[in-house]
Image (cartoon, grey):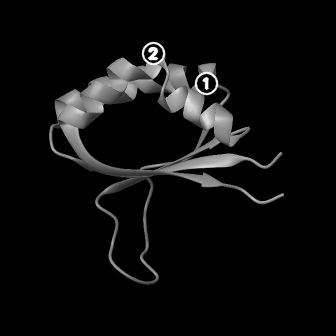
Amino acid sequence: MPYAYVVAQVDVKDAAAYEEYRAQVPATIAQYGGEYLARGGKVEVLEGEPPLGRVVILRFASLDQAKAWYNSPEYAGPLAIRHRAAVSRSMLVGGVE
């Protein structure tokens, strides 16, 4: 089964609230078997428009695992904080076998 990736662009509007989110979310990702591959590092645009802000890439064992994390009760609280603290674009991408 191929990996699944959550890719997010995050434009932080409230830094203090976003730090609260950042403190809470890693444990929820780990609980569902996910891991960070990129987390706000340097971005160099090769084509098109630049991302909104920070780029975050997570890897999960499957699409089902990624969806389970995103829709989990453990992530609901941090997600609400992120929605207040930032404007985001998030997507789920299936890997190749």
* Amino acid type of the residue tagged 2 in the rendering: Pro
Measuring from the top left, give residue 9's x and y in whole percent. 37, 54
* Amino acid type of the residue tagged 1 in the rendering: Ala
Q: Is residue 4 left or right of residue 6?
A: right
Measuring from the top left, give residue 41's x and y in whole percent. 45, 55
In the image, residue 14 sits, relative to residue 43, either above or below, namely above
Please state which of residues 2 and 56 is positioned toward the viewer in this rendering: 2
Measuring from the top left, give residue 15's x and y in whole percent. 19, 37
Q: Dividing the picture into quarters, in which one does residue 21 lie?
A: top left
The residue pinned by badge 2 equals 73
The residue sitting at the left extreme is 14
Of label 1 and label 2, which has the lower sequence position? 1
The residue pinned by badge 1 equals 30
Q: Residue at x 79, y 49 (%)?
A: 2
Please state which of residues 43 and 5 is positioned toward the viewer in this rendering: 5
Q: Residue at x 38, y 82 (%)?
A: 48
Q: Is residue 69 left or right of residue 32?
A: left
Q: CA distance from mark 1 to mark 2?
A: 14 Å
Q: Residue at x 50, y 26 (%)?
A: 26
In the image, residue 58 sits, relative to residue 34, either above or below, namely below
The residue sitting at the bottom extreme is 47
Q: Residues within 10 Å of mark 1 (few under 14, many from 20)?
A: few
